[in-house]
Amino acid sequence: MKTIIYYFTGTGNSLAAAKKIAAALGKTELVPIATLMDTPGDIMPAAERVGIAFPVYFAGLPAMVASFAARLRFREAAYVFAVATFGGAGAASALRQLDGILRENSSRGPDAGFAVRMPGNYILMYESPKGEKRAAMLATADGEIARIADAVQKCRKQELPRSLFEQVIHALMYRWFISRARGKDRIFTVSEKCTACGTCVSVCPAKNIELVDKKPVFLHHCEVCCACIHNCPAQAIEAGTKTERRQRYRNPEVTVAELKLRKGESQ
C-alpha cells in the first residue's frame, strides 16, 4: 500500500515525525509542501494513504499549509491522516482548522488526526528547551510517533481532538498572528558575523530571502518558520535583541541538507 506524506517544517520537527512514520510504513514518499506552491491547480495524491505533517502556529496552521490544504483532492477510498507537531498547545485547534479546510474544498476531512509534542522553535518569543528537558521531550515524542505509525499502518480511524481552550486561543490570536506574519521579517537583522554562505536562502520554504551584495535581504512574504535564524551556521540572523541570548534549535534527526530539499535542491 503506497503512502504519501506531505510536510512543512522550519527546524525539522514535522519532517522528523514524517520520516519515522515513513520508515515504519515502508513504500512511502515524502513530499515537501514548499516544492508545490509554484504549481497551480488541484493536487490529487496517487496513494492509498495520504498524510499531512505540520507544526502548530498560535493554535492554527502555517499559512502555506492552509493554502496547500485547500488544493488537495482525495481518492474516495484513500485513508487520510494528519500529524501536528507542537511545542506548547494548540494542536487540537490546528487539526480542526485543517479539517474545515479539507471539508470545504474536497468534501472530506482526515480519517485521523494526531498530535506530537516536541521542542518549540519560536525563538522570537522564547528559547527552545535544551539539555535533559529537550532529550526527554524527544524521547516521549518518539514513543508517540511509533504509536501513530501503528495506527496509520492499520488505517485506524479516530475522531479529531477537541479543546475549547485552544479554540479560544485560535479565535483571539491566530488571525492576529497570520495577518502580521508576512511582514514579521522586518524586525530581522543580519550581523557582521554573516559569511554569505547562503544557508538562509536555501532553507527558507517561502523563498523569502535573497543574497544581495553578499548579505541576506528579506522580501516580506515570511512564514515565520524561523528556519533562517535557527539554521544559520554563524548565528548571524536575529529578530530584535532577545534572540541574541537564545540557543538555536534543529531537530537532531534532521540535517540542514534535508531542510534545503524543501526547495527542490539536491545535496
Image (spheres, rainbow, N blue to C red):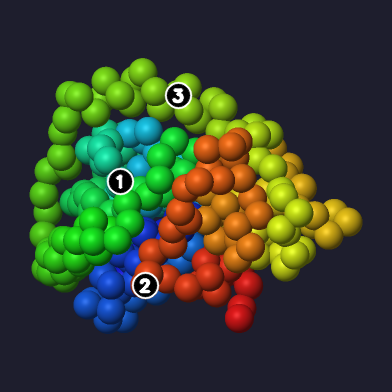
Residue that extends furthest to the right in the rendered view of this protein: 213
The image's mark for residue 175 is: 3
Residue 243 visible in the displayed image: yes
Amino acid at circle 3: Arg
**Residue 181 position in % (x across, y down):** 56, 33
- The residue nearer to you, when weighing 39 against 41, is 39
> For the residues carrying marks 2 and 3, which lies nearer the camera in this image?
2
Circle 1 residue: 87
Distance of label 3 from label 1 (alpha carbons): 19 Å
Which x, y percent locates residue 37? 59, 52
Under circle 2, the secondary element is: loop
Quarter containing the C terminus: bottom right
109 vs 133: above or below: above
The residue under the point 36% across, 59% down is 13
Under circle 3, the secondary element is helix
**How far apart are labels 1 and 2 at the CA level?**
17 Å
- For the point 11% across and 60% down, which residue is it? 156
Residue 46's image quarter? bottom left
Q: Which residue is mark 2?
A: 253
**Horizontal side, residue 170 vs residue 214: left or right:** left
